[in-house]
Image (spheres, grey):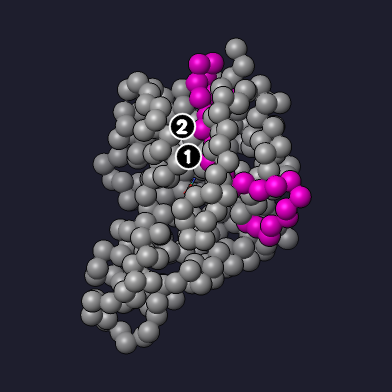
């Protein structure tokens, strides 16, 4: 499949576009205007993204059966063979809910930021552009190698690392910790353990910004992803943080997705 997509889209900058733009573009003028290297009538649609998600869910399921609930991340990145379209969460642009937040709450230059489960590095690069000294990590060595390849002149320190093995020197070290979509890709009890591990990384005057899919407590969507209910986030409070701001909103994706954006800081 990636070969077919590359044949269809390789020459027109398609891979540089965000997933939304890719979908918009495919739906408005599928294959339009660009001479095809192959006559195969492949069109990128919401359905093809759903297929990617289903393939990822199947991979995750395989790992759960083998009692390896974290192994599927590396399997997904490695199996993608450098094709970003095989990574359902890779938008190749900074998270819009991070951008919004920073536009409204700029922070002084030179602060230390940490990006958790950084994926392909777009949020880390954005924070670096905004003057932070950034460390970004992901459990997948392939994702980290991919970040370094995508951003060869980056100032970000990328590390292949499991959150549960975070170095002791990171405890209470970071002025700004950003977590998007990692918690929703974990189930209990790993999710609660991750919340505890994350909470330890924020400095006494620091902030932690979390963006996640949201749901009502009684909803039981099939995942991954597994959206969080508001009470799932209460573990941050048990871990010694206070919630400074909480937003529950519907984003502008197609189809729209309910999200929570929450800001935490250590209780002083
Ligand atoms: C759904 S993806 C989101 C990636 C990125 N934050 C984004 O918004 O595009 C979740 C990421 O968390 C990483 N991850 C999951 N568990 C982790 C852990 N225990 N330590 C570090 N990274 C982890 C995965 O490899 C994956 O890249």
Q: Mark 2 or mark 1: which is in front? A: 2
On the image, the x and y values in percent for residue 246 come to 57, 33
Nearer to us in this view, 202 or 33: 33
Q: Which residues are magenta?
A: 200-224
Query: Which residue carries the number 2 mark?
Result: 114
Placement of 49 over or under 256, stated as above or below? below
Judge left or right: residue 202 versus residue 224: left
Q: Residue at x 67, y 63 (%)?
A: 62
- Give whichever of 21, 149 is nearer the camera: 21
Answer left or right for 141 relative to 131.
right
The residue carrying mark 1 is 137
- Quick one: quadrant of the C terminus? top right
- Where does the image place residue 235, in percent across and percent down from the top left? 69, 32
- Ligand 1 lies under 8 Å from the Cβ of mark 2: no
Real-space Cα separation, disc 2 to disc 1, in angstroms = 8 Å
In the image, is residue 53 part of the stretch drawn in magenta?
A: no
Q: Are marks 2 and 1 in contact (CB under 8 Å)?
A: yes
The residue at the far top in this view is 268
Place of residue 138 in the rendered image (x, y in percent of width and height, measured from the top left): 50, 43
Specify whether residue 211 is painted magenta: yes
- Residue at the image position 50 percent from the left and 21 percent from the top: 206
Point out which mark residue 254 bears: none
Quadrant housing the N terminus: bottom left
Which residue is at 61% across, 54% downward?
225
Displayed quadrant of residue 266: top right
Is residue 21 at all visible to an observer of this figure?
A: yes
Query: With 190 as the anchor, is 210 left or right in this view?
Result: left
Ligand 1 is within 8 Å of the C-beta of the residue at disc 1: yes
Q: Secondary structure at mark 1?
A: strand
Disc 2 crowd, CA 10 A, few/some/many (<14, 14-19, 20+): many
């Amino acid at each position: 499949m990636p070969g077919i997509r590359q044949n269809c889209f390789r020459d027109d900058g398609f891979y540089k576009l965000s997933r939304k733009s890719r979908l918009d573009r495919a739906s408005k003028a599928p294959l339009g205007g660009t001479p095809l290297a192959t006559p195969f009538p492949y069109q990128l649609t919401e359905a093809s993204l759903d297929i990617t998600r289903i393939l990822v869910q199947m991979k995750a399921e395989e790992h759960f059966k083998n009692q390896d609930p974290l192994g599927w991340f590396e399997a997904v990145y490695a199996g993608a063979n450098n094709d970003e379209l095989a990574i359902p969460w890779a938008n190749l642009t900074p998270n819009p809910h991070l951008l919004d937040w920073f536009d409204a709450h700029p922070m002084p230059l030179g602060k230390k930021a940490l990006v958790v489960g950084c994926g392909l590095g777009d949020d880390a690069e954005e924070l670096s552009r905004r003057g932070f000294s950034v460390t970004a990590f992901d459990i997948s060595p392939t994702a980290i190698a991919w970040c370094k390849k995508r951003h060869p002149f980056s100032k970000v320190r990328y590390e292949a690392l499991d959150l549960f093995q975070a170095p002791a020197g990171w405890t209470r070290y970071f002025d700004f910790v950003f977590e998007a979509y990692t918690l929703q890709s974990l189930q209990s009890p790993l999710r609660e353990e991750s919340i505890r591990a994350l909470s330890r990384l924020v400095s006494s005057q620091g902030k932690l910004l979390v963006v996640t899919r949201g749901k009502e407590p009684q909803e039981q969507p099939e995942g991954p992803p597994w959206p969080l209910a508001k009470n799932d986030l209460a573990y941050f409070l048990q871990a010694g943080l206070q919630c400074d701001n909480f937003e529950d909103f519907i984003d502008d994706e197609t189809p729209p997705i309910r999200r929570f954006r929450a800001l935490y800081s250590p209780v002083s």
